[in-house]
Image: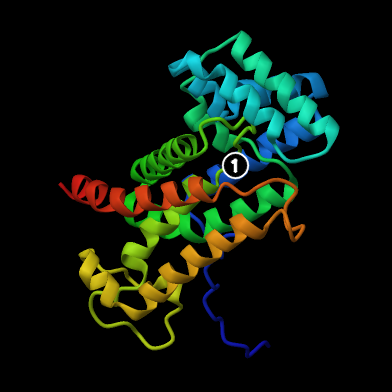
Amino acid sequence: MDATPDFPRPPRVPVFNMPAVVTASVGLMVLIHAVRVLLLPDSWDITVLVDLALVPARWTAALDPDRGADILRAAAEAQGGFLEVEARKAFAAYILAEPGAMPWTFATYALLHGSWTHVLLNGVWLAAFGTPVARRCGAWRYGAIALVSTVAGAALHVALDPLSTVPLIGASAGVSGLMAAAVRFAFQPPDGPVAPGTPPWQRPVATRLQTIPELLRNRAATVFLVIWLVTNLLFGIMAVPFGISESAVAWDAHLGGFVAGFLALPLLDRLGRR
């Protein structure tokens, strides 16, 4: 006879401990890049890039046609090898020959990435910071914060570099916005007592958001904000010279997305609670 006590079966732990909307977001990013890399011919992939990436000079040419000469001059003076500069000049001429703002590119650029490393880095950060936002806000407000941050990042990038013919791609602006939204409540003490040994990801979050002065008095939140701002600026300046990235990092898009997410969360949080 077996005298081993019949213990209850432990609960099943999910493989991905993330809200469904975050899992779907990461999966969509990976799927789109896999299709581009593994299935699309190069000519089709170039068409996708031209039609969905954000090109600041395209907006400048559409809104102010008189700046065509400035766009061509900026493309000719851009740093790079001979073939790269010639390609930029040809692309600038193409933009001026068929001007069009393509407003959807303010959002669709976030669906494209330059490499598997680019996809995986954004996916990891999206999983880390999108998860608490989705758990607090729900799927549609999570999506709204990501979209607003994506558009705001693109807008600031166009405003600061209006003559650039380099396509802007990547979900980093939207991820930065979700990161900023998570900062608004992730460093607050939880409401009510917490049982000893409770993992951080299972602790209840505070119901009331801290005001900006309260947040700035929160040492952990302030340290995180300073580290993010400094590293974002340094990475944008040093990525190409030190070989970290083959192309310039759009630090301004990250900053625009971060500020938008930081400001959007309180508005959407109150709207959802009403």
Q: Quadrant of residue 115?
A: top right
Q: Nearer the viewer, residue 167 or 148?
A: 167
Outermost left residue: 274
Image height check: is 166 above or below 190? above
Mark 1 belongs to which amino acid?
Gly
Instruction: Give the percent coordinates (x, y) of residue 40.
Output: 78, 25
Quick check: can you spot residue 18?
yes
Identify the colour scheme used: rainbow
Q: Nearer the viewer, residue 49 or 40?
A: 49
Left or right of 152, for residue 128: right
Quick check: can you spot residue 207?
no
Q: Nearer the viewer, residue 271 or 265?
A: 265
Q: Report the residue at 46% width, 21% height from top.
A: 103
For disc 1, the neighbor class at 10 Å (few under 14, some 14 to 19, many from 20) is: many
Instruction: Give the percent coordinates (x, y) of residue 219.
Output: 34, 80
Quadrant for the N terminus, please.
bottom right
Q: Report the residue at 79% width, 26% height from top.
A: 86
Q: Nearer the viewer, residue 6 or 68?
A: 68
Instruction: Give the percent coordinates (x, y) of residue 33.
Output: 70, 37
Instruction: Give the percent coordinates (x, y) of residue 182.
Output: 39, 61
Image height check: is 173 above or below 94? below
Q: Report the residue at 61% width, 60% height from top.
A: 235
Q: Report the residue at 56% width, 81% height from top.
A: 6
Total marks placed? 1
Q: Quadrant of residue 221?
A: bottom left
Tag 1 residue? 170
Left or right of 232, for residue 225: left
Q: Secondary structure at mark 1?
A: loop
